[in-house]
Amino acid sequence: MPLESGAVLRQAQDERIGEQRRTVSGLFRLFRRKEKTTDALAKTRQGWGGGLGALFGGGSGGDDAFWGGLEDALISADVGVPTSLALIERVRERVHGRSASDRAAAADALKDELALLLDVAEPALWDWYDQEELPAKPMVLLVVGVNGAGKTTSIAKMAHHYQELGKTVLLGAGDTFRAAAVEQLRVWGERLGAGVVAQAQNADPGAVAFDAYQAAVARGVDVLIFDTAGRLHNKAPLIEELRKICRVLGRQGSGAPHQTLLVLDATTGHNGLEQARVFQEAVGVDGVFLAKLDGTAKGGITVAIAAELKLPVVFIGTGEGIDDLSLFDVDDFVDALFGGATAGDAPAGDGLAGDMGAGGQEPSR
């Protein structure tokens, strides 16, 4: 066999092996994502799931008691009153004519309606987050959120996520108001082996954005993740600052910033909706990174975000480790809320799946 033909065969074999490894790796990531989502929702399951378990597990009581208990369970999980009432109304319509004792039908209807509410993302959205070939280079991801929501750690997790996809990442330290924010980002950059573009405290964030984009282009970086300030108590100057950053980035690259993600602390519950409205007004938001989901029993805020703001949840924080995040998947999320069980599987009062164990909260910032 000619040497040239042998080299071609070896190259083809290497490509097949590489593809097999990528497939196995992708399946493993998919399994781990669902497992992490299930673990992260343990507290929420114990909270609203305990109430739902009693209802769907065959608890006693007439129709009024059943629907009233379902309303209480949803509202207590921070789904919100308007969304909870609308959900119950649609579930009642789907099981119309059946007795409330047919709990399996009601549970299935609730799962379906939750999935419909949560599925607000356009399919093209995921091209920016889970594809090996991103639609732009550098892809510019602007990260907004109030101080204390977990922005810095969430940025580090997303940087690691893109590195796992084989992408090079550069971080931009746009929160120049807080010296600690810049330092934290530098520490994460060192841990991840990612560059960080920063200036002195109180520097113009727009100037940092300019430098960060120019550095990303010069270094041939795939993804630029840009941090911003979160002084919501000082709303008017913050909004103007964010808009200026967007203008600067927009002048540098076509379509930049390509995605704007809002980091919300899941433990704040329904208060997060007001934060989301402020940032929507300021710069527009493409999606939500729901941080610290593992540390709250109020996971229903995920439903409220989708129903009231029509914002898709893109990532969820599932623990304190650098790889403790999952790309949001509607079916995984709904299954995790119910623990993968069907009505009647669990004794009344035990929840639908019992305690699956929860990861720790993200480190304090």
Image (spheres, rainbow, N blue to C red):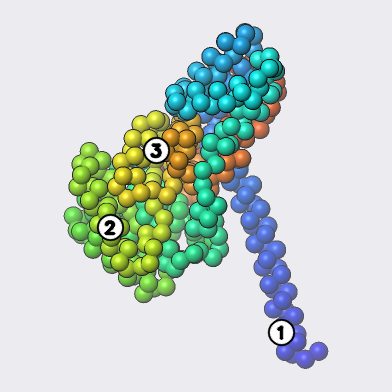
- Residue drawn 58% across and 36% down? 115
Q: State the separation of the CA atoms marked 3 and 1.
A: 53 Å
Residue type at tag 3: Asp
Name the N-terminal-most of marks 2 and 3.
2
Instruction: Read off the residue under disc 1.
Output: 7
Q: State the separation of the CA atoms marked 2 and 3.
A: 23 Å
Q: Are marks 3 and 1 in contact (CB under 8 Å)?
A: no
- The numbered disc on residue 159 is none
Query: Which quadrant holds the N terminus?
Result: bottom right
Residue 258 at x, y percent in the picture: 41, 59
Compared across the picture, whether 99 is left or right of 68 comes to right
Residue type at tag 2: Ile
Instruction: Read off the residue under disc 3.
Output: 265
Residue 72 visible? yes
Disc 3 is placed on an element classified as: strand
- Residue drawn 75% across and 85% down? 6
Name the N-terminal-most of marks 3 and 1.
1
Q: Which of these two is toward me, 144 or 24?
A: 144
Dot 2: within a 10 Å radius of its alpha carbon, few (fewer than 14), some, or many (20 or more) residues? many
Q: Which of these two is toward me, 335 or 120?
A: 120
Instruction: Read off the residue under disc 2.
Output: 245
- Residue drawn 55% across and 23% down? 89
Disc 1 is placed on an element classified as: helix
Q: State the separation of the CA atoms marked 2 and 1.
A: 50 Å
Compared across the picture, whether 90 is left or right of 212 comes to right
Count of residue discs:
3
Judge depth for marks 2 and 3 and give the one in front: 2
Dot 1: within a 10 Å radius of its alpha carbon, few (fewer than 14), some, or many (20 or more) residues? few
Query: Which quadrant holds the C terminus?
Result: top left
Give the quarter of the image for residue 362.
Answer: top left
- Residue drawn 25% across and 48% down? 239
Residue 189 at x, y percent in the picture: 38, 59
